[in-house]
Amino acid sequence: MISLKEIKHDLPAGIVVFLVAVPLCLGIAMASGAPLFSGIIAGIVGGIVVTLISGSQLGVSGPAAGLAVIVLHAIQDLGSFEVFLSAVVLAGVIQLVLGFLQAGSIGYYFPTSVIKGMLAGIGVIIILKQIPHAFGYDENFEGNLHFLEPQGGTTFSEIFKAINYITPAAVVISVLSLFILIFWEQVLAKKSRVFQLIQGPLVVVLLGIALNVVFDNFFPQLTLRDNHLVVLPVADSIGGFFTLFTAPDFSRVLSYEVLFLAGTLAIVASLETLLCLEATDKLDPYKRISPANRELKAQGVGNIISGLIGGLPLTQVIVRSSANIQSGGRTKLSAFIHGLLILICVMAIPNVLNMIPLASLAAILLMVGYKLAKPALFKSMYRNGMMQFLPFVVTIVAIVFTDLLTGIGIGMAVAIFFILKNSYQVSHFMHKEKSVEGGELYHMVLAEEVTFLNKGNILRTLRKVPEGAELVIDYTKSAVVDHDVKELIEDFRETAHTKNIRLTIHELQEEELKV
């Protein structure tokens, strides 16, 4: 249910998300080898349809950079964008089924260190990817989060190229925009509520348009051309606008290629959505918990509708969601406003949107990236210890040098290593005391849950019990003792007499076996 009570916060936030979303929708469509308008359709559906169904208050959905490579190869392999759309519809159906099967709980099994690493990694990626746009080198696609660029090269090689192709007007606009954004947030917003309602990003976009108009009229050699501006498809009439939509071709919907693609899209899109949902909840200043299964259903309906009218597959996306939170959004109204604005503006004023310099948007995204990867976050994670810090850092580095899902997978591997290491070390507690006879009494109490992973540690401890000692092994407090561990203890019981060890075992059934 959408409420208007927070509109004074949600309206300006929705405008900022709208400004950020338009070039991202277009860039992802371009990177996907799809019609540009398909990205806009996905943005509209994500903003309006998914928002209405979703239980996430601050999440924003739209076309996802993580699916761009899959979409690009799928369109090429299928040989038809219309056939590809049928796979998007089917993927939505699969997501809907996953939602009803309660599959959304998967997202809760990712450790906080990896989720925070994902957020910081995305922040670093945004900064690195926007530096070329801030210099006026706009060859790479907006929304691309992969280390390897589609046209060749890497994230870092694009930055070095940008230094050789500096566009003075773009640099002027991006530097002024950054100054205004920082001054607006650090000074003006603290002095008057007017500056809280009127967001700095909207001001820098208007400034960018105005500066380019001034350049065009008085310094034509500095004017930013089309390749440095937002490029939105423009319809010559209302009828022409509706021709930009595409209907799917279901003639091959039951073929292996389409079914396999639909399954791939559903799994990858669902995983990205659940990860972003978890990350968005962590950024939420009110710490609300979004229903994961409901989100899968919302994404499923969104993908069905997007595919039926010619849109790209969509997910919840962290760049737009974090921009929403950092711009002061408080409820789902901000995401709905962003979707509504995309629809209205592409219908009514596409030419105005096409005047927005990419350098202005680069400045906005640079601020978003910085807030996601603040130095204070690194200090906080370091203070939490190596078990938290290492998976966090590894996730960041892996995301920067690969892509989102691969980076998270590598971070998860490191986190799981620490979990296994911890499990290995905390399998039991051993203490030594004097027995009644005056000898050495060793008391081993097994942990609540003991698995085969603990065999090595328990065996090493048992081997250290000296000859002639008395040993009590107690697992009455254990809820689960793996068969392998029981077998290990029984083997030790059979050989304890060879070292003259008097062994007592307190089992789960409170029985005692004395040797």
Image (cartoon, grey):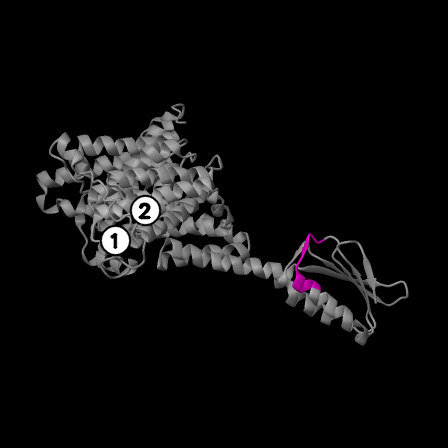
Left or right relative to 423: residue 108: left
Q: CA distance from mark 1 to mark 2?
A: 13 Å
Left or right relative to 239: residue 113: right
Point out the residue furthest to the right here.
437
Give x and y (percent) for residue 386.
54, 58
Give x and y (percent) for residue 121.
39, 52
Residue ID for mark 1: 72
The part of the image, by quadrant, that contains residue 16 is: top left
Q: Amino acid at mark 1?
A: Leu
Residue ID for mark 2: 64
Quadrant into which the N terminus falls = top left
**Foreground residue, 53 or 398?**
53
Quadrant into which the C terminus falls = bottom right
Choose mark 1 or mark 2, whichever is in front.
1
N-terminal of the pair, mark 1 or mark 2, is 2
Give x and y (percent) for residue 359.
23, 45
Q: Amino acid at mark 2?
A: Ala
9 over 147 or under it: above or below: above
**Foreground residue, 492 or 364?**
492
Q: For numbered disc 1, what is the local secondary structure?
A: helix
Give x and y (percent) for residue 204.
26, 37
Query: Magenta residues?
Result: 478-486
Q: Residue at x 47, y 52 (%)?
A: 114
Q: Is residue 373 visible?
A: no
227 over 213 or under it: above or below: below
Q: For numbered disc 2, what is the local secondary structure?
A: loop
81 over 194 or under it: above or below: below
Q: Residue at x 29, y 54 (%)?
A: 257
Would you call the spot at circle 2 few (<14 residues within 10 Å), some (14-19), or many (20 or more)?
A: many
Disc sitting over residue 16 in the figure: none
Would you call the spot at circle 1 few (<14 residues within 10 Å), some (14-19), or many (20 or more)?
A: some
